[in-house]
Amino acid sequence: MEEKVLGYGVIGTGVYCDHYFGTLGPVFKNLRPVGCSDLNVEAAKAAAARWNVPKVYTTEEMLADPEVDIVIILTNPASHYSLTMAALKAGKHVYCEKPLAASLQQANEIVEFAAEKGLFVGAAPDTFLTPEFQTVRKLLDEGAIGKVISVTANYVGPGADLWHPNAGYLYKKGVGPALDMGPYFLTTLVTLLGPIESLFAYANRGWDVREIWGKDVEVEVNTNYCGVLKFSNGVVGNLNLTYDEWRSSLPGMEIYGTEGVLFAPDPNAMMGPIKLLKAEDFKNLVNSKGDNVGARLGAIYGPEANGLFTEIETLAPRVGNQRGAGVSDMAKAIVEGRKPRVSAELCRHVTEGINAFDVSVATGEPYKMTTTFEMPAALEF
């Protein structure tokens, strides 16, 4: 049976629109571009020309277009709430770049209104749907490392200053690394391990003024966060998010269990292999050293154990950057009458989590989460 194709429109044709136009249609065949809009009309026309998008029009015209089933919002985060609500009021399903909203209150309004209207709403990131993280999910579900005990995740780098042409907005109120990069890591963590119960964070900033492409930009937010997470299932972990460091050898993500260790890629850049160390192999290596305590310690703490890690092949190859998998899944959910894997409740939980960092920093207390969600079903490849 031929898959039903839904139409989508894009609001905001800046840096990220090519990721979506490049996959939604060319890679994910159940969607076709209908039109795009941008305050910069010339930018919208240029994007339409690059990707053979039929219509360039105002946002109001897009929301009135019956060919548009899903509206994709790729604008500055400050406008996500207002544009999402406008699209929902026009009867459109919505997929938004991260974050879903600037606050939990806004996210609650979006989720409740969408439910009232019988519409779907979701937000990036959808990188947990890539073959890499679906492979990690399968390994965890199958008990490859036994009972999960803890996790570490790290976004450590210099921010977008050296590549993004408009990076200055990242240092203004309402943004910063927690709201900008936090969604990648929190979304991946909770879709692997379940909802967060509580979160505690410390934060500071490296510079009050940053030089970005030859211009001084005043920093209005914290730019370095150390967070501690407790998940509802008892797993604990830490999440480091910083724009203040030049380089790091820290892993994107490591998950520790009673029967092994799992190395996972960075949920943003998707760089790095999946590697598995089995506890039994580790114990056998140490025991092979006999009664020599020094040799046993060398096996435990030295480089020899690194050879025990096995690189795991992904369930399927990734096609390009694969951004847009969440929109494609939403389109299938509309046709099939099920909940999307990038659900409104998941996005609200992540929105609360990224805002919890600053609440905890301000109060000096752990933040207890008030929202939860149903774990999305694993993908089949």
Image: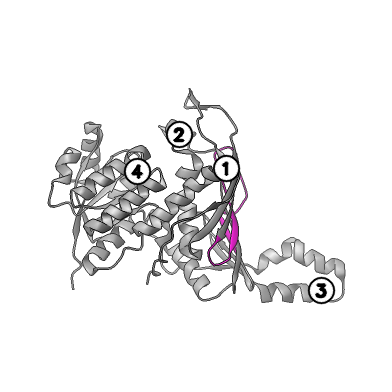
Q: Does residue 352 appear in the picture of this structure?
A: yes
- Give the magenta range: 231-255
Q: Nearer the viewer, residue 99 or 158?
A: 99
Q: Earlier in the sequence, mark 1 or mark 3?
A: 3
Q: Residue at x 32, y 49 (%)?
A: 109
- Residue at the top extreme of this rendering: 215
Q: CA distance from mark 1 to mark 3?
A: 51 Å
Vertical relation: 1 (above or below) 133: below
Q: Earlier in the sequence, mark 1 or mark 2?
A: 2
Q: CA distance from mark 2 to mark 4?
A: 21 Å
Residue underneath mark 1: 363
Please, what is the three-letter code of the amino acid marked with disc 1? Answer: Thr
Q: CA distance from mark 1 to mark 2?
A: 18 Å
Residue underneath mark 4: 16
Residue underneath mark 3: 289
Q: Which color mode does the image show?
A: one colour
Q: Earlier in the sequence, mark 4 or mark 3?
A: 4
Residue 366, percent across and down?
58, 50
Q: CA distance from mark 4 to mark 3?
A: 54 Å
Q: Earlier in the sequence, mark 1 or mark 4?
A: 4
Please, what is the three-letter code of the amino acid marked with disc 2? Answer: Lys
Q: Earlier in the sequence, mark 3 or mark 2?
A: 2
Please, what is the three-letter code of the amino acid marked with disc 3? Answer: Lys
Q: Earlier in the sequence, mark 2 or mark 4?
A: 4
- Indicate the secondary structure of the residue bearing disc 3: loop
Residue underneath mark 2: 173
Mark 1 or mark 3: which is in front?
A: 1
